[in-house]
Image (tube, rainbow, N blue to C red):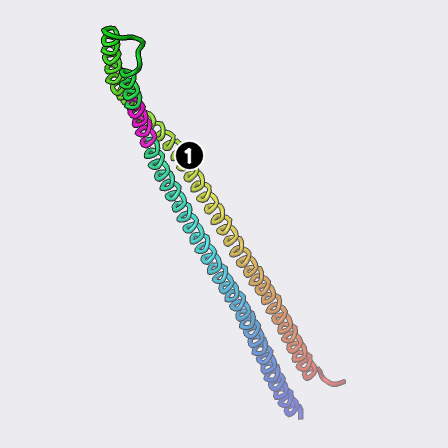
């Protein structure tokens, strides 16, 4: 009878050990499955976060490129318009200068013609003076008339010559007058060029400032996206660590309970009844 009881105890001990081993195996299997599930889920969430961050960065990059393109296009158009206005201003100045040069030349030619015409007029008047009535008679009248004709002829011949000399003297000033027009035109041209260069420099500075601001805004946006993504990934990593640690703790507790229960049952079998 004692041998039979010992045999039964040994069999029961084996069943307890087998059941304990099976239970521990289930706990380990469940632990591994749960940990793998948590890790896979967290990895999926991290992949979604990184994918969303990458898509957001791509959208920001595209928007930034479009903004720079629009800025460059507007800058180019403004430069072209500025250059066109500058060319038109110079063309108008050249036309006005040429017109003024022509007008000055015409005025001088008119003045010369008027002087020569005045000389011819005075020559005719001087010739007429030779036929003027004189208060003489006889030989005295003949002598006086002859003298008057001689004087009148001298005046008549001198007037056109003097007038021509005066006209030529006026004509000598044409070059100086036209040079004054050209000098004034060059001063206006310098002012136009100065205004053009100043506007061009200002436009360039404005464009560079706008591009720099756009680049800074783009950089800040990308940094914020990466920071948010890194923060989310870190939070998910911490959640995974705490969850896995909790699962390991629960599994350890379950294993400890199974081991304690198995040991208690084994001790109960080995303890003789009183």
Query: Residue 259: x percent and y percent?
Result: 64, 77
Residue furthest toward the front? Answer: 138
* Left or right relative to 3: residue 62: left
Residue at image position (65%, 74%) is 256
Q: Is-magenta flag for residue 25?
A: no
Above or below — where is 9 with respect to 120?
below
The residue singled out by tag 1 in the image is 191
The front one of 245 and 179 is 179
Residue at image position (42%, 40%) is 196
Magenta part of the chain: 105-119
What is the total number of numbered labels drawn onto the structure image? 1
The answer to whether residue 85 is seen in the rendering is: yes
The front one of 213 and 57 is 213
Magenta stretch, overall SS: helix
Q: Which SS class for mark 1? A: helix
Point out the image quarter for the N terminus.
bottom right
Point out the image quarter for the C terminus.
bottom right
Residue furthest toward the top? Answer: 140
The front one of 223 and 216 is 216
The answer to whether residue 175 is seen in the rendering is: no
């Amino acid at each position: 009878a004692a041998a039979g009881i010992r045999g039964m105890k040994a069999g029961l001990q084996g069943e307890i050990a087998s059941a304990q081993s099976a239970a521990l195996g289930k706990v380990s299997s469940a632990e591994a499955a749960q940990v793998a599930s948590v890790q896979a889920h967290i990895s999926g969430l991290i992949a979604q976060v990184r994918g969303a961050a990458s898509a957001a960065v791509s959208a920001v990059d595209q928007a930034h490129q479009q903004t720079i393109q629009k800025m460059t296009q507007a800058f180019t158009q403004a430069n072209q318009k500025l250059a066109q206005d500058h060319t038109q201003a110079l063309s108008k100045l050249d036309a006005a200068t040429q017109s003024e040069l022509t007008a000055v030349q015409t005025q001088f030619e008119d003045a010369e013609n008027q002087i020569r015409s005045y000389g011819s007029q005075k020559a005719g008047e001087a010739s007429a003076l030779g036929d003027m009535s004189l208060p003489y008679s006889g030989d005295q009248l003949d002598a006086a008339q002859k003298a008057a004709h001689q004087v009148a002829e001298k005046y008549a011949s001198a007037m056109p010559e003097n007038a021509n000399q005066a006209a030529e003297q006026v004509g000598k000033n044409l070059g100086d007058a036209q040079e004054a027009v050209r000098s004034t035109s060059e001063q206006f041209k310098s002012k136009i060029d100065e205004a053009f260069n100043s506007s061009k420099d200002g436009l360039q500075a404005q464009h560079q400032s706008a591009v720099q601001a756009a680049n800074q805004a783009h950089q800040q946006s990308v940094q914020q996206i990466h920071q948010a993504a890194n923060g989310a990934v870190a939070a998910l990593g911490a959640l995974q660590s705490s969850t896995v640690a909790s699962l390991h703790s629960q599994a350890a507790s379950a294993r400890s309970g199974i081991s304690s229960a198995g040991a208690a049952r084994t001790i109960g079998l080995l303890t003789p009844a009183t």
